[in-house]
Amino acid sequence: MSKVKQMEVTPKSITKEELEKVTDLQTELQSYLANIGVLEVQKAKAIFQVNMLEKDMDEMKKSIEENYGPININLTDGTYEEIEVKAKE
């Protein structure tokens, strides 16, 4: 049997400064990606809250309309004007 001569292979590498720059950029990128994730969760919560407030507003409008009929409310002082409902022909 023949013996195969094994050669030592020296690993190739980038400079220390290049490696430091690459790792710094990767760390900063990961930080921004994590922040985007947090902001997306906050956005989803805000959208949910807006939807709940719109639902509450619709329920309040129905309640007021049941008590007063169709009206326009002045949100500064609470006064209102009745809305004329045109009869369907």
Image (cartoon, rainbow, N blue to C red):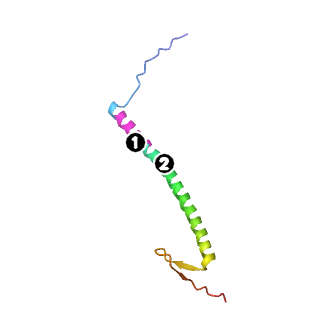
Q: In the figure, 18 relative to 62: above or below?
A: above
Label 1 and label 2: CA atoms lie apart by 15 Å
Instruction: Look at mark 1 in the image and give the residue it sits on.
Output: 28
Q: In the figure, 86 relative to 21: above or below?
A: below
Q: Mark 2: give few (<14), some (14-19) or many (20+) Cα within 10 Å.
A: few
Most common secondary structure along the magenta stretch: helix
- The magenta segment is 18-30
Q: State the quadrant of the N terminus.
A: top right
Q: Callout 1, which amino acid?
A: Glu
Dot placed on the residue nearer the N-terminal end, 1 or 2:
1
**View extreme (top): residue:** 1
Q: In the figure, 18 relative to 51: above or below?
A: above
Instruction: Look at mark 2 in the image and give the residue it sits on.
Output: 38
Residues 34 and 48: in front is 48
Q: Callout 2, which amino acid?
A: Val
The residue located at (51%, 57%) in the rendering is 46
Q: State the quadrant of the C terminus.
A: bottom right
Residues 31 and 20: in front is 31
